[in-house]
């Protein structure tokens, strides 16, 4: 019999179902506590998927609590304050709206926009709210809203795109990095003429950036403004179609392209399923799983570009549920930090030191709201270097070894309640289950069991052995994978 979180499960089928749902929550959220897994298992896999896909049915984070206890919330005058709010929100919604936060993180990586240039924190936070609110809807209105987003307009200079002086920056990145990609199957997806025509269509799309005093209510966010006198009304030819196109027309044409379906599908696969090559290689490198990408492409068109429908198709597919897909992605720093905080029950309240904890993402090389370039962060093994790995291991080990955290206390109590006869194998396997059914290499598991056995033989109490096992599992290579 397998015992998890204080509950008894009589057969391997239930354990396998639990491991599958733990996999789902690592990808569609930031992991799940043992108690949450109990709840999701009682619902079943498909019902859990539907719950995840409809975050609007769940209560959001209580902003009054943030405002009262985290004073930087009102103004977010500095990058660190905005980053802290972002991490706090991810962790605060990890139990109630996990997919909403995960999708916002996904789009932040695709539509990479950075404070290094924007230098207006509230405007950047509004962009993340845009991803939260509309990130599960149709891709076309999401792009239309993004084209009107003040942070993006400033980030890619469309406020300097005038009918008599075209600035191609937004038009180029819209095609190259935000929708179609440079090419696929060894061919180019668009020409330089298409870039210029797209830029013409977005002339006059600008912002009101008049700042008022930041006291007492914080910075005033920038607003979108359309200037008809600065818009190029001339005929344009874009991707083989001709007309008096404006920006929305360009986006409508983009969303109809097979290359857009491929581009979004590859991004979703790379973020939610398994690490693949980086975006610049997509033109000449086929997908790691062409059949999976084809399934997602078909759903993109069948559903009218609906992201929620694509995710439902993904999460219920055999390629996602396969055991080979589990632990096939290196966790991003945000996933390491938020996933660990959620598991141990820390930072659910804006306590003192919240900023120091949130900045761990930066120390692990993911400076949220401030990606290194318009290309975003390179993922997979490129998350890891010697410095970031040390930060990852130390952070996780410290959190999992802190019995003052309610989640750690619950895990220790769940295991010690099994009785004094629990051996080293039982302790290690129990910890692996409680941490989300982590799967270790045989040699790593053998080493941890030997260490636990030695501690027991030397008279260590069960709690000390369990805490050590939790810390050591958190220090493994395998814990760094989702």
Image (spheres, rainbow, N blue to C red):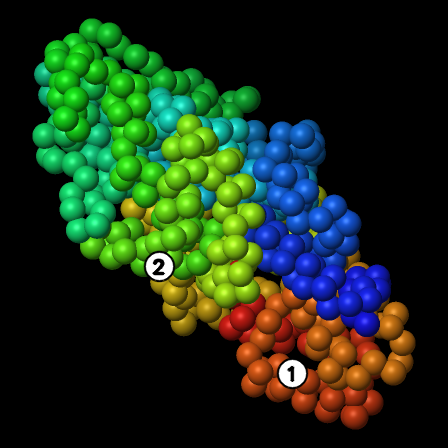
- Sequence-wise, the earlier of marks 2 and 1 is 2
Q: Nearer the viewer, mark 2 or mark 1?
A: 2
154 left or right of 72 in image:
left
> Could you say whether the residue bearing mark 1 is in a helix, strand or loop?
helix
Q: Relative to 161, is 434 above or below?
A: below
Residue 196 % position (x, y): 13, 27
Q: Is residue 98 above or below residue 323?
A: above
- Residue 111 picture quarter: top left
Badge 2 is on which residue? 288
View extreme (top): residue? 229
For the point 19% across and 39% down, the residue is: 189
244 and 222: which one is in front? Answer: 244
**In front of the other: 264 or 464:** 264
Of the numbered discs in the image, which one, if any, rests on residue 265? none
Q: Is residue 6 left or right of residue 271?
A: right
Q: Position of residue 140 (x, y in %)?
A: 38, 26
Q: Quick one: 15 or 60, which is closer to the camera?
A: 15
Which residue does the numbered mark 1 point to in the structure image? 448
Residue depicted at x 68% and y 85%:
449
Mark 1 neighbour density, 10 Å: few (under 14) some (14–19) many (20 or more): many
Tell me the CA gap for discs 2 and 1. 34 Å
Q: Position of residue 460 (x, y in %)?
A: 80, 85
On screen, residue 3 above or below 332: below
Q: Is residue 467 left or right of residue 482?
A: right
Quarter in which the N terminus is drawn: bottom right
Q: Quadrant of residue 101?
A: top right
């Amino acid at each position: 019999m397998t015992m998890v979180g204080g509950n008894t499960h009589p057969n391997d089928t239930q354990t396998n179902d639990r491991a599958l749902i733990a996999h789902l929550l690592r990808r569609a959220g930031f992991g799940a506590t043992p108690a949450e897994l109990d709840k999701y298992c009682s619902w079943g896999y498909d019902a859990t998927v539907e719950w995840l896909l409809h975050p609007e049915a769940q209560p959001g984070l209580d902003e009054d609590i943030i405002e009262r206890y985290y004073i930087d919330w009102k103004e977010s005058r500095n990058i660190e304050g905005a980053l802290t709010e972002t991490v706090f929100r991810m962790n605060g919604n990890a139990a109630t709206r996990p997919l909403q936060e995960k999708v916002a993180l996904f789009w932040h990586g695709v539509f990479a926009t950075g404070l290094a240039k924007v230098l207006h924190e509230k405007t950047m936070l509004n962009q993340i709210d845009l991803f939260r609110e509309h990130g599960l809807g149709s891709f076309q209105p999401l792009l239309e809203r993004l084209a009107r987003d003040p942070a993006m307009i400033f980030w890619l200079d469309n406020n300097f795109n005038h009918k008599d002086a075209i600035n191609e920056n937004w038009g180029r990145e819209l095609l190259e990095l935000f929708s179609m990609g440079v090419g696929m199957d060894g061919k180019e997806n668009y020409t330089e003429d298409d870039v210029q025509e797209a830029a013409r269509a977005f002339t006059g799309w600008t912002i009101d950036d008049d700042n008022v005093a930041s006291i007492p209510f914080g910075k005033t966010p920038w607003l979108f403004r359309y200037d008809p006198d600065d818009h190029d009304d001339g005929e344009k030819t874009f991707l083989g179609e001709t007309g008096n196109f404006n920006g929305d027309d360009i986006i409508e044409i983009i969303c109809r392209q097979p290359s857009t379906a491929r581009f979004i599908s590859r991004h979703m696969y790379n973020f939610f399923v398994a690490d693949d090559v980086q975006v610049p290689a997509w033109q000449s490198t086929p997908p790691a799983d062409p059949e999976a990408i084809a399934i997602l492409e078909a759903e993109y068109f069948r559903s009218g570009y609906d992201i929620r429908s694509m995710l439902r198709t993904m999460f219920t597919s055999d390629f996602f549920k396969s055991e080979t897909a589990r632990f096939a992605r290196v966790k991003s720093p945000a996933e390491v930090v938020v996933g660990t905080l959620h598991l141990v029950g820390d930072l659910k309240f804006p306590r003192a030191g919240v900023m120091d904890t949130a900045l761990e993402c930066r120390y692990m090389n993911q400076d949220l709201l401030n990606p290194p370039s318009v290309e975003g962060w390179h993922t997979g093994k490129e998350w890891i270097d010697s410095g970031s790995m040390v930060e990852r291991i130390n952070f996780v080990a410290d959190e999992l070894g802190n019995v003052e955290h309610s989640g750690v206390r619950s895990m220790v109590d769940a295991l010690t309640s099994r009785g004094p006869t629990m051996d080293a194998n039982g302790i290690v396997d129990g910890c692996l289950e409680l941490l989300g059914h982590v799967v270790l290499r045989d040699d790593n598991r053998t080493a941890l069991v030997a260490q636990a056995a030695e501690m027991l033989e030397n008279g260590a109490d069960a709690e000390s052995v369990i805490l050590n096992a939790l810390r050591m599992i958190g220090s493994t290579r395998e814990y760094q994978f989702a």
